[in-house]
Image: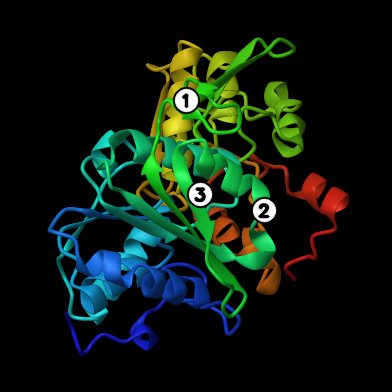
């Protein structure tokens, strides 16, 4: 344990930073408090952290409760980078390792802590893996802000765990604690039930397109309004382009449609989300385009060389977090696109449609 560790030293970098945005919140602190005794009783390799936004739970478990060889899964790549930076800032360069959301992450785990995802599918995928591959005595401590929590979250946990209870609320946060895994029983009906298979798959007849989605992927297997808007422009996008990027690809619908419509294109699909990248890989494969589309987990094209792209397609994200700061598109995406040397006029963006429908304020 470390007496020198303080939450105040943690930062959100490289994510957005603003006075109203914090690197550690009441949920992080409450989870670590509720799980402290369980964490302190673990052996090396028995603690798993999921959904740690900037490293507060991982570093707190190590420094305050003596957890060792902690396995961590963070969906956004910026979360991984923030944890690495905060570990260095706190003088804690080791003690944890990043893993994808697979059985290996949970195998033999006895304590799982984390932030509750807002998506029920994301929660279900985590919970099913934890119950199926964690130790027989595994316990999950997942916290969230009360305003974002629903009874449906309890139901999802109850499908895989026999005991689910909620903590008292503290500073507008609450913890759900799940134990006694039962991966083969649906608690709502009392009969054996197969787990939901991820990635989910859906065939869209109007586009003759398969869409695959892991739990954390935005919109699941649906085709959202911004993506449909962009699909209308496929035949008008830079006809002589050699390389195209689907920036913030999600489940890979735009990249897949582009590759199918334009055989001459080399298509790159990129997203910061591990769930999105896994989903895009599955979507590309389901449509027989694995050889045509490269899928990268990346933060806003940071690993691509300057002037290496002819066409960018982007259905930009608009999430509640950003309403407290700036239009998210202006923060990273405009800078990336303006610096990418894409020929003028060959950036196809759903931004105008999104603004007209959802009244997102202009960035300037």
Quote the CA–CA distance across marks 1 and 2. Answer: 21 Å
Task: Give yes or no for contact between labels 1 and 3 (Cβ–Cβ under 8 Å).
Answer: no
Residue identifier under label 2: 150
- 96 lies left or right of 359: left
In the figure, 352 relative to 206: above or below? Answer: below
Residue 225 percent coordinates (x, y)? 76, 36
Residue drawn at the location 64% of the way across and 37% of the way down: 219
Q: Answer yes or no: do the residues labelled 3 and 2 have beta carbons within 8 Å?
A: no
Please, what secondary structure does the residue beneath circle 2 have? Answer: loop
Q: Position of 184 compared to 61: left or right? A: right
Q: Is residue 265 visible?
A: no
Q: Which sits in the foreground, 352 or 103?
A: 103
Location of mark 3 (residue): 341
Q: Which residue is mark 1?
A: 195
- Local packing at callout 1 (Cα closer than 10 Å; few below 14, some 14-19, many 20+) is some
Which is nearer the eye, 52 or 330?
52
Depicted 71 relative to depicted 128: above or below: below
Name the quarter where the N terminus is drawn: bottom left
Residue drawn at point x = 72 percent, y = 67 percent? 363
Q: Position of residue 364 (x, y in %)?
A: 75, 71
**Mark 1 vs mark 3: in front:** 1
Q: Can the viewer see residue 291 in this picture?
A: yes
């Amino acid at each position: 344990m470390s007496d020198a560790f303080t939450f105040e030293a943690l930062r959100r970098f490289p994510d957005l930073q603003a006075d109203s945005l914090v690197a550690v919140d009441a949920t992080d602190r409450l989870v670590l408090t509720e799980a402290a005794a369980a964490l302190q009783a673990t052996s090396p390799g028995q603690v798993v952290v999921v959904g740690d936004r900037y490293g507060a739970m991982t570093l707190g478990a190590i420094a305050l409760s003596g957890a060792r060889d902690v396995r961590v899964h963070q969906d956004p790549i910026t979360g991984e980078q923030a944890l690495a930076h905060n570990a260095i800032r706190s003088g804690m360069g080791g003690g944890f390792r990043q893993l994808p959301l697979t059985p290996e992450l949970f195998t033999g785990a006895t304590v799982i802590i984390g932030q509750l995802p807002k998506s029920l599918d994301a929660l279900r995928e985590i919970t099913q893996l934890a119950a199926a591959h964690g130790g027989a005595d595994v316990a999950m401590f997942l916290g969230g802000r009360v305003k974002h929590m629903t009874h449906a979250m309890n139901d999802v946990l109850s499908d895989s765990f026999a005991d689910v209870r909620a903590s008292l609320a503290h500073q507008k946060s609450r913890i759900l604690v799940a134990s006694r895994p039962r991966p083969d029983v649906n608690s709502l009906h009392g009969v054996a039930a197969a787990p939901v298979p991820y990635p989910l798959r859906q065939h869209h007849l109007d586009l003759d397109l398969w869409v695959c989605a892991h739990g954390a992927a935005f919109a699941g297997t649906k085709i959202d309004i911004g993506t449909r808007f962009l699909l209308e422009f496929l035949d008008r996008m830079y006809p002589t382009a050699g390389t195209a990027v689907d920036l913030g690809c999600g489940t890979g619908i735009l990249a897949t449609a582009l590759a199918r419509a334009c055989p001459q294109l080399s298509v790159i699909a990129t997203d910061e989300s591990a769930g999105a990248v896994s989903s895009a890989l599955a979507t590309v494969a389901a449509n027989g385009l694995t050889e045509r589309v490269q899928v990268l987990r990346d933060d806003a094209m940071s690993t691509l060389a300057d002037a290496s792209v002819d066409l960018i397609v982007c259905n930009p994200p608009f999430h509640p977090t950003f309403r407290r700061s700036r239009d998210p598109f202006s923060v990273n995406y405009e800078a990336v696109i303006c610096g990418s040397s894409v020929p003028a006029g060959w950036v196809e963006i759903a931004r105008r449609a999104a603004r007209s429908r959802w009244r997102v304020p202009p960035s300037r």
